[in-house]
Image (cartoon, rainbow, N blue to C red):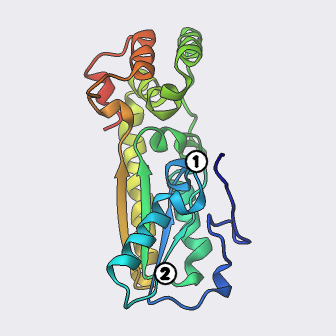
C-alpha cells in the first residue's frame, strides 16, 4: 500500500468542502509547508491528528482543524493563506514555520519586493552544492542548503529574520482585527539535533560541505 493525497475544492488538505461542513464550535486554520501538508494520508497530517486529539479530549464540542499548507510555502505564502481563507472565520490561526528552509525560500521574494538584488553563489559554491546534492539530496533540502547559503551570505541572516518578523506582524494585525488567536509553531531542522544513532545523510552533507559544528546551528 501507499498513501493517498487528496485536496478539496479550496485546495485544503481535507476530504470535505468547508461550505458543506456544519459550523464548528472551534475552527483552526493551519498554514505551513510540506511538513504540515504531509507526505502521508490526509488524516495523518499533524493538523488532522490535532483535530482528532482535540475531539477526543473535548467530545462535547465540535472542532475543525483545516490544513491549508502546501509544499514549498514560506512566510509570504503564510500571510497570503490567511488573507485567502480568512472568510472561513477561524478562531485560531496557526503558522507552522520550518527552520530548515523557510528563511532561505523567502529570500527571492524578499529581495524582489524590496527592490534589491539577491546575492549570487560563486561558481565554486555551485559546484560544492551540486556535489553535496548528489551524496545527500534530502539533507540538503531539509536544512543544509540553507546552512550553506547563510554561512556564505551571513548578512542575509538578519535581513531574512527581519522580513519574517514583519510578515508575522502583518498576520498578527489581521488576526487582531478579526479577533483570531494567532499561534506560531517552530519546527526545527533535523540538522539541529544530535541523533542518538547518528544520521548518515546529515553527516554526508556536513562532510561534503565542510560544515563545522557551530555552522550546523545556523538554522536555529
Q: Is residue 181 visible?
A: no
**Considering only vertical position in the picture, is 177 above or below 154?**
below
List x then y, in percent, for residue 213: 26, 19
Front position in the image: 84 or 162: 84
Q: In this view, which residue lies farthest toward the right? A: 9
Query: Circles 2 and 1: CB distance less than 8 Å?
Result: no
The dot on residue 90 is 2
> In the rendered image, which residue does mark 1 sit on?
39
The percent position of residue 128, horizontal first and vertical second, equals 53, 11
Q: Judge whether residue 158 can be spotted in this image.
A: yes
Q: Give the left or right position of residue 17, taking residue 113 as reference.
A: right
Marks 2 and 1, Cα distance to the nearest angstrom? 25 Å
- State the SS at label 1: loop
Relative height, residue 113 to residue 12 (above, below)? above
Q: Nearer the viewer, mark 2 or mark 1?
A: 1
Extreme residue in the front direction: 1
Q: Residues within 10 Å of mark 1 (few under 14, many from 20)?
A: some
Picture disc at residue 185: none
| Residue at the spot 45% in from the left edge and 64% down from the top edge | 49
List x then y, in percent, for residue 44.
51, 58
Mark 2 or mark 1: name the one nearer the start of the chain.
1
Q: Quadrant of residue 22?
A: bottom right
| Rendering quarter of residue 172 | bottom left
Q: Nearer the viewer, residue 50 or 74?
A: 50
Q: Give the tally of numbered discs.
A: 2
Amino acid at each position: 500500500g501507499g498513501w493517498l493525497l487528496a485536496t478539496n475544492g479550496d485546495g485544503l488538505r481535507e476530504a470535505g468542502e468547508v461550505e458543506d461542513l456544519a459550523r464548528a464550535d472551534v475552527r483552526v486554520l493551519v498554514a505551513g509547508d510540506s511538513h504540515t501538508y504531509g507526505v502521508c494520508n490526509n488524516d495523518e497530517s499533524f493538523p488532522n491528528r490535532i483535530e482528532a486529539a482535540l475531539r477526543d479530549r473535548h467530545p462535547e464540542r465540535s472542532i475543525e482543524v483545516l490544513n491549508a499548507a502546501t509544499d514549498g510555502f514560506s512566510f509570504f505564502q503564510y500571510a497570503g493563506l490567511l488573507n485567502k481563507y480568512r472568510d472561513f472565520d477561524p478562531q485560531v490561526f496557526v503558522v507552522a514555520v520550518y527552520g530548515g528552509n523557510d528563511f532561505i525560500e523567502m529570500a527571492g521574494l524578499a529581495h524582489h519586493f524590496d527592490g534589491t538584488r539577491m546575492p549570487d553563489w560563486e561558481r565554486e559554491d555551485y559546484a560544492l552544492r551540486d556535489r553535496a546534492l548528489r551524496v545527500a539530496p534530502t539533507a540538503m533540502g531539509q536544512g543544509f542548503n540553507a546552512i550553506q547559503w547563510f554561512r556564505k551570505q551571513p548578512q542575509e541572516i538578519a535581513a531574512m529574520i527581519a522580513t519574517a518578523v514583519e510578515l508575522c506582524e502583518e498576520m498578527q494585525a489581521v488576526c487582531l482585527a478579526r479577533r483570531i488567536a494567532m499561534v506560531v509553531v517552530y519546527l526545527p531542522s533535523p540538522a539541529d539535533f544530535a541523533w542518538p544513532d547518528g544520521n548518515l545523510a546529515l553527516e554526508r552533507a556536513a562532510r561534503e560541505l565542510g560544515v563545522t559544528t557551530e555552522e550546523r546551528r545556523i538554522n536555529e
